[in-house]
Amino acid sequence: MLTESQIREFNERGFINVGRVLTDEQVEGLREGLDRVMAGKTERKPELLRNLAGGDIYADGDAQGDAAPRVFANAVVIQIVNIWEAEERYFHHIYNPLITTMAAQLCGAEVLRVWHDQIQYKPPGVGTYTGWHQDYPAWPILEPADLVTAWIPLDDATVENGCLWMVPGSHRWGIHKGLRTPEEGFDPIYDPAQLPAGARVVAEPLEVKAGHCEFHHCLTWHGSPKNPSPHPRRAIAVHYMPGHTRFVPRGRHPMDVRVEVAPGEILAGKYFPVVWDKGPVAPERLALT
């Protein structure tokens, strides 16, 4: 459970590091599960597995086989959407009662569903940046903009290996069009005319230890620099939505194909499982197609 002070900090800043939520054994299990999915060793597949930076993930493209270790391409951010569909440990992770209890508090929700999850993995040396953005504008099929993300690194996320950077208070400024990332440095490029009076844009790094959790609002400005270090930076983000979230299509999203409700209806269905209903919900394996 979060304290009133922690909830107030989240509401004021748009993010908060709540500390450890996973044991070392759970973290190691999620690392192993990620390796299995990336190696294609699971019966089911995630919704999406790609290089978010564009191009191939590996230097030898789509080559298959375990004859030799795979070599990553020169600029890589591996994104896997809905790894929970493919790997049992991630399925149980989205229901973790410690995490869902805090997410429900931050959303002020009696019912909580999973919008989707995603892995973001910056390999050592070649992991490139994730540009400054807000999550909600990339999700143009749902309303309102009050989702919360539980972001948990599977390796210590540090300034050296490309941890998240945040702009405190930015979730209160609405949707900002044209956020960009400079070629040098990592301060966001933005349009001052879109900011409310008195807004201060001060980016700060958010270092988070493996197995610890930071929550952020879906309108909080954030991004992460390159990983030039010899250490991986793997993380699992679960995007939780309050029970009142509706399907309002204004654009396209990879989860379009899993929506089974009409425009304007509550975004529900087996691909958007309920993980909190006035209390933690026990995992129940879903019959996915």
Image (cartoon, rainbow, N blue to C red):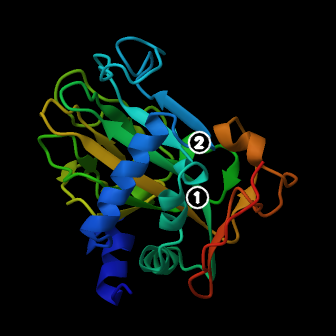
Instruction: Sort mark 1 into few (<14), some (14-19) or many (20+) by Cα contacts within 10 Å.
Output: some
**Quarter of the figure with residue 2:** bottom left
Query: In this orientation, does residue 249 appear?
Result: no
- How much space separates mark 1 and mark 2, taking CA atoms? 25 Å
Relative to 287, does residue 232 appear above or below in the rendering?
above
Which residue reaches farthest front? Answer: 67
Which residue reaches farthest right? Answer: 262
Q: Is residue 251 left or right of residue 73?
A: right
Q: Residue at x 41, y 45 (%)?
A: 34
Mark 2 sits on what residue?
Answer: 46
Q: Is residue 267 left or right of residue 36?
A: right
Q: Is residue 261 left or right of residue 249?
A: right
Which residue reaches farthest top? Answer: 60
Three-letter residue code for mark 2: Pro
In front of the other: 123 or 253: 123
- Circle 2: element type: loop
Residue 7 has which mark? Answer: none
In front of the other: 186 or 206: 206
Mark 1 sits on what residue?
Answer: 145
Q: Earlier in the sequence, mark 1 or mark 2?
A: 2
- Circle 1: element type: loop
Q: Residue at x 52, y 67 (%)?
A: 92
Q: Which quarter of the figure is the N terminus placed in?
A: bottom left
Q: Nearer the viewer, mark 1 or mark 2?
A: 2
The x, y position of residue 24, in whole percent, is: 25, 66
In front of the other: 133 or 12: 133
The x, y position of residue 241, in whole percent, is: 60, 64
The x, y position of residue 274, in whole percent, is: 66, 71
Marks 1,2: beta carbons within 8 A: no
Three-letter residue code for mark 1: Ala
